[in-house]
Image: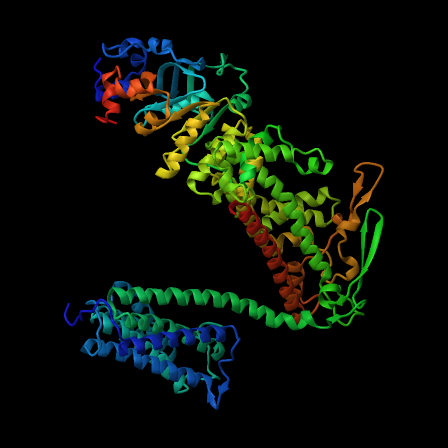
Amino acid sequence: MSTELDETQTEAAQSPAELGGATTVGETDERTRAEWVDHEFDGDAKIAVEDLNVYYGDDHALTDISMEIPEGSVTALIGPSGCGKSTFLRCLNRMNDRIGSARIEGSVRIDGEEVYRDRADLVELRKRVGMVFQQPNPFPKSIRDNVSYGPRKHGDLDTTFLSRLLGRDDVDEEASLVEEALEQAALWEEVNDRLDDNALGLSGGQQQRLCIARCLATDPDVVLMDEPASALDPIATAKIEDLIEELAEEYTVVVVTHNMQQAARVSDQTAVFLTGGELVEYGDTDQIFENPESQRVEDYVTGKFG
Amino acid sequence: MSGATEYDLVREDTSILELGAGATVGFAVVLFGFGLAGLFELVAVTESVAGVQLPRLLGGLLTLASAALAWFGIASHRGLVPTDPRPSAGVVAATGAAGVWFVVGGLVGSQTLGFGTVGWLALALLAGAGGFAATALPREDLGTTLPVAALTGLGGLALLTGVIGPNWAWSPVGLRATFAAPIAIPIIVLFCSLLVGWAGAKAYGGFGARGRHLGAYALVYLNVLAILGVLVGLLAFVFTKGAPVVVQGITVGPGVGPETTIRLFGFAHTVVWPVDWPFVMNGVSLYAEVSGVLPAIVGTVWLVVGAVLFAVPLGVGAAVFLAEYAEEGRFTQVVEVATNALWSTPSIVFGLFGYAFLIPRFGGSKSLLSGMLTLGFMLLPLVVITSREAMLAVPDEYRDASAALGVSKWQTIRSVVVPASLPGVITGVILGVGRIAGETAPILLTMAGATEPSAAETADVVGGFALSTSPPFVTNPALLEATSALPYQLWAIISTGVGGDAAFGWGTALVLLVVVLTFYAVGIASRTYFRRKLHE
């Protein structure tokens, strides 16, 4: 099969199954998918994905994805629009379950535990795998309530009127948790004097950092970010990028981005998805951008298409 | 375009046309307001001012405006003033003029000249065609001003010469009704000033595109003025008629008011009001100097409270199911159509349902509880419709964000979706309460008690609660007794003449208006509160 883009697209639409196997991707300049799994990274594998296929109705959105994401690093997912990178990200915390027509096959393991078990605990999974969205989406509540929303709803913080009345509330714990999360999101300095103000009054960049703080407040291991800076101006983007690098010291970060420079700047390893929902190349960021093995990836990262 | 004047980009001084036309428009607005005030009898248009009969004065002013308009058109046509007219005033304006002149021709032909059907119809058609031609055929400046000037001049002269005077009355042939001067004169003034405002605004803008824009602007603003006028006029009308009855006998001072005993489960506390307001604090009584509507006020308030307490939890619950849990599809469509149909069901049908279904189940006689539930059934569909819309309008981003934090669907609904949709829900309740508080027909069938309730018949719902040792453990006879309500008492007074004279009815109407507006105010205040909480 040719590796030219238009043909690939046609094939993907017509017969997804044909595209699925390693053989169809296995041109001379592209390694087979099995090798991506064996790719050796410095850290241990935090997330292990194997033979992941996603269908939206008849649309085959992801084809036989297998990869391992190492702990305590930043992994960037890049690729043109509609290549399935956001879909892949949403598989990691089962947000795709919320789309009625989605069908997911394959295996995703986090710390060796299968996420797609029948009896998987979604609450626990999403506490452990936090997510930040493309559009900043704080709740129409105060900054404090936004940050403590997750722990409160999980029952980790009790600040109800009744418990305050009985004197067994967690107001102090809440205050320190809110401060810690906002510090981590580099927002504390800007908002510490107005925690009771509505979050919708913040600027777009501040709102996005608040969403990161809200996600960190549930104490996750993994932070998923779906184009976190694409709705922001360059200065706010720079702040988010700095933040991502800082977060990698404590968390495993997976970032979807449209912006290849951003991927090159912030990530330790990069996965390139191309049209048809296939993972074409995955490796250390330097290698992907300077010396990719696949011709299609080279065309993409050098801006010949996409 | 012949005769069109090139404008400078910036015009420093005001031209004589702008000055005159601007004054004419202002003049038209004043006359329009005057006409509205006259229509609602806030100004007596048949009076005299400084020895001059008001109709003659108004006629003179209209004639003056007519002459000014005619001058604008002719001066513009002759090129005396800089304007930018188009070749024609256009088909829309011409059609409007044709309609107006058709009516004028028909009225003059049939009523003034006494023609038969064929005669007046011919004259009406002729006048209509003339109006159309006079507007559409000449250049825009003449076509806009002259037909309006002619009509205004006709109306103005009729008033000025006394043809239509204070004692004028018109009894149309074949119609058993009489239109007297107090209604005819304001209508003539309203109509003519509307047209003068439009034509004057067009002249002010120098005709052309800018003139049309300003003409439309003048019409829209006069329309707004008319709506506000109707609103204010209606309130003022009820107020002037009702206020004297409502305020009579008010005294303020410690201990002058009636005693009220507040009872709750056997405990009693008596309050002596520091104000005595007979109309609001008394029932109907032969012994009191001033009879009042206290039982009806209390009945209406309890009705609305009961209906809201019944309908809002059920309606919001149904809306949560429809918006959050039910799959969009055939089922939700059917439910949507059914709720819309229920909301447009005539209230007497709800009343009949309450009469046939509720009353036999609640002791067989009309009762407050039956009324509450019947009005609750009426309110329910609107609460469902507006709450569902409000919840569907909550952005999915909030739901995604909450789900991604591992928060369950029900907790998300409770702490994000419902708070975010509250302002919309409250809007629905406000609209619904406005409707049910004024309902008469269902109350008539399900709840109505005495038409002349005395103060002793006031429903004591709070004090009515009593505990008992056998099921149902809590009883409340007040809920199961018939009582009165303001719209019902008003209907009884006005239509059957029982329970007081017409003045008493106007007082009741004013109190009903104030009670409904108070519910509105409470609703709007709480909506503002929740909205502010969401955004500030």
Residue A213 percent location from the top left of the image: 50, 32
Which quadrant of the view contains residue B410?
top right
Q: Residue at x 61, y 72 (%)?
A: B241
Looking at the image, residue A144 lies above or below residue B11: above
Image quarter of the N terminus of chain B = bottom left
Residue B210 percent location from the top left of the image: 27, 65
**B361 relative to B185 in the view: left or right:** right
Q: Residue at x 37, y 34 (%)?
A: A238
Looking at the image, residue B289 lies above or below residue A129: below
Q: Residue at x 75, y 67 (%)?
A: B275
Q: Nearer the viewer, residue A132 or A65?
A: A132
Looking at the image, residue B441 lies above or below residue B66: above
Q: Residue at x 36, y 66 (%)?
A: B219
Residue B159 percent location from the top left of the image: 40, 83
**B480 relative to A288 in the view: left or right:** right
Residue B421 percent location from the top left of the image: 53, 42
Name the colouring of the figure: rainbow
**B395 relative to B272 in the view: left or right:** left
Q: In this rendering, does residue B491 appear at all?
A: yes
